[in-house]
Amino acid sequence: MADPGDEHAGRTGPDANRPLPGTDGTGSRLGGLADWGKTTWIVGLALALTGLGWWYAQQAVESATAERFHAESFRLQGMITQRMRGQETVLWGGVAMMNGSEHVSREEWATYVASLGLMERWPGVAGFGWATPTDPSDVVERAGADEAPGPERLEATVTFLEPGNEQNERAIGADLAADPSLREALGRARDTGRTVASAIVESGAGGPEDQRWFALVAPVYERSVDLDDVDDRRAALLGWVYTSLGLDNLTGQRAARQAGPIDIELYHGDEAGPATLLYDHDPSMPATAGDRLTRQITVGGPEQAWTMAFRAGPGFATTADALPTVVGVAGLLITGLLLFVVGSYRWFHGRATELVATRTAELEASNDELGRRSELLQAQTIELQRSNDELRQFARVVSHDLQAPLRTMASYSSLVTSTYQDRLEGDGQRWLAYISSAAKRQSGLIRDLLQFMSLDRLNGEPDRVDLNDVMDAIARDLSSLFVAESAGLTVERLPVVAGDAGQLQRLIGNLVHNAVRHRRPGVPAQVVVGAAPIPTDDDGGGPGTGSAGDDATWRIHVRDNGPGIDPELRERVFEVFHQPDPASSTGTGMGLAICRKIVRAHGGEIGVVPTADGGSEFWFTLPTAPAPAGGDAGAGDGAGGGDGDRGDDGPVDGGGSESEAGTRGRTRSRRPTVPVGVVAEEQR
Amino acid sequence: MSGSRDEGERPTVLLVEDSPADAELAVIAIRQARPEVAVEVVNSGEAALRYLYHDGEHADAPTPDLMLLDFNLPGRSGVEVLELVKSDEALRAIPVVMFSNSNAGSDVASAYRHHANAYLLKPMEYADIKESLTALLAFWLDWVCSPAADRVGPAV
């Protein structure tokens, strides 16, 4: 995760040390650590729960398995014990038969054995026989003497052996005592008078030949003889009844089948060891001592003990025993899933945090940029203001200090001319006039330049300006010019517009002045000033109605009968210092440029079009003044009445009269032609 | 024309003008138009105030009947002098006519805001100078009433 602090480090400006609200870098860093801690906790807890679940499942399964094993082993134990007891009983049956009659024939023995159903009821029993000592008198042993030399002289000849199959037939007549295990068992049975199990017989006569076996041996003594000690028994011994049991299927198919994956080991005596092993149900099963699912028990008395060992094999565990594994795997899966979810969350959270940090940094950068620009703008505004102030100061200096010398030149030239008139030659007077006119011309130029410079915008809010009043003032100002040029002026009804009265007077005055001055040689100028509303979409009134809506625009024109303007020059006449005819001009060349500036400052347009008779029509547009409450946005009503007495003095020229006569019928309050000549004469 | 004044006492005009050429031109024009008018010329605003307050060499100078004040003066400007004169109870009645090389709207407005009696653009032609001064003197010296006891109106 990117460190937000680094993002902040690059920041400059007054806010550099103050992080934005909610984006505190330290906070998110600590939050990240806490999140890692949480993740660890969650995963750890999940693992612990998994382990606990696995352990409990293991315990439950183990205890259930152990119970099952014990139940099974007890059942097997019972089965085997019963079997052994049964064998013993059968054996004692044989003993009883031998005791019960003087002489038992082989047939009687065979009948008895057959009646037992030996093979069917006692699987594993290979034979049921009668062995007799060859020479009982030889078997005289000293008391307490070592057994080892004793059995050397012991012989037990197999007399009967049923069932009478081939291998049992072969065994008849063989010496049972030839095998050490059998000899020991025979001797012990003889000496104790009890049933004795032999150790395993690896290969010996009297039993099955194809497998290892052992024998249960019971002694038969002479009747009515006291059997108080070993010597009595040895002396009274008639023979032994024995059964041979093959070890391969000792427990029988049934027991083996029911044992299942439990290994059964049967030992001879009370010790479990390879030497005493009688039966091993599944020799492939490892004899791991100490296993929990192992049980060992010794049954029987001190004379004859059996040791049984039960051991659960790998197959003993059922499918239910897989529960701990299932629990563990499921727990690990869930933990992994949890880790994945938490990791994903953390990743997305990290991404989001990064994104937020990036966006915040970008925003700050853009804010800084904005701030810088704002400062720059402010600085530029201040600079502009200062520059404007300087310009104003400059204009002031120019208007006063540059004008003063020019005025001095002009006035002193004229003073010399008037004072020394009689002493100056014609040339001298003319030359002084040059000085004077040049000074005056430059003075006018400076004045126009200053005005041009100051006309970029309106000074304050626009006023309601009645152009009829403006025209009155212009007519008065230019009256002497009109007289001098014998010019005529016709003023039609003019609207009230929004603007600066002084500037509008200068605008129209300039146009009228130009119209008078730029005349055809020998033809007196005829100037017509008029206006018409420009219809707009929402303006119902057409041209000539004399009124327009609030949003309407007026087109005001100053028309002359002059020589017209070359089409190529129509746009250039509004440029600064443009003089269409420098030789004949007395102007500064700035008049129309000032006009254009004034119109533009009022939000209008200006242009010039030729008239039908070859003259020029200068036109410009102005917005209508918003109507005052109850007022008339159209032409000033007082204009006609106020100027009426002057109008009554009579027009100066016929052209104006014609125009007046032609329009009077349509507009009642239309202004009359201004009789400039008469006014001028009155002023003189 | 000067009948309202004591015999032998000439009306006085105080001309405040820093340009010697302009000052001389005005003096010439006044002499030609009204030879009986005494013209006192000072070339700065400070000098004008010293004159009005009878300071130093002007201890015995008469209070002017009319002040012709150049708008553009070095040091104390014409408008400042005007302001001081018009804010002084004793001097307020003296008509002050401002002369300027500029007819810029702000200049004119500033002059009238400080109670100038008139504002004139200095003419270019000597003839116009003479004409304007003649009319000016005739108006202020002959026709206008002054609170001073010996100036009670036109002598008709």
Image (cartoon, coloured by chain):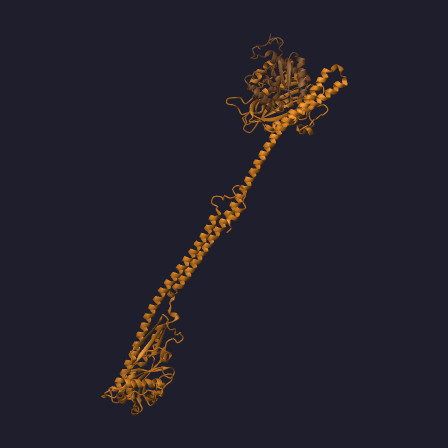
Chain identifier matching the orange colour in the rendered picture: A
Q: Is residue A365 visible?
A: yes
Residue at the image point whose x is 40% and y is 75% from the top: A284
Residue A604, percent from left and from top: 60, 28
Residue A381, compared with residue A251, is above or below; it is above
**Quarter occupied by residue A617:** top right
Between residue B56 and residue A449, name the one nearer to us: B56
Residue A484, percent from left and from top: 68, 17
Total labels: the figure holds 0
Between residue A549 and residue A195, name the one nearer to us: A195
Between residue A655 and residue A177, name the one nearer to us: A177
Give the drawing colour for chain B.
brown
Q: Is residue A606 visible?
A: no
Residue A582, compared with residue A57, is above or below; it is above
Residue A111, percent from left and from top: 28, 85
Residue B89, compared with residue A78, is above or below; it is above
Residue at the image point whose x is 40% and y is 64% from the top: A325
Please, which residue is most extreme toward the left here? Answer: A224
Residue at the image point whose x is 51% and y is 42% from the top: A15
In the image: residue A664, left or right of residue A278: right
Between residue A460 and residue A368, name the one nearer to us: A368
In the image: residue A626, left or right of residue A276: right
Residue A423, percent from left and from top: 76, 15
Please, which residue is most extreme toward the front here? Answer: B56
**Quarter occupied by residue A545:** top right
In the image: residue A438, left or right of residue A163: right
Task: Locate the C terminus of chain A by quadrant.
Answer: top right
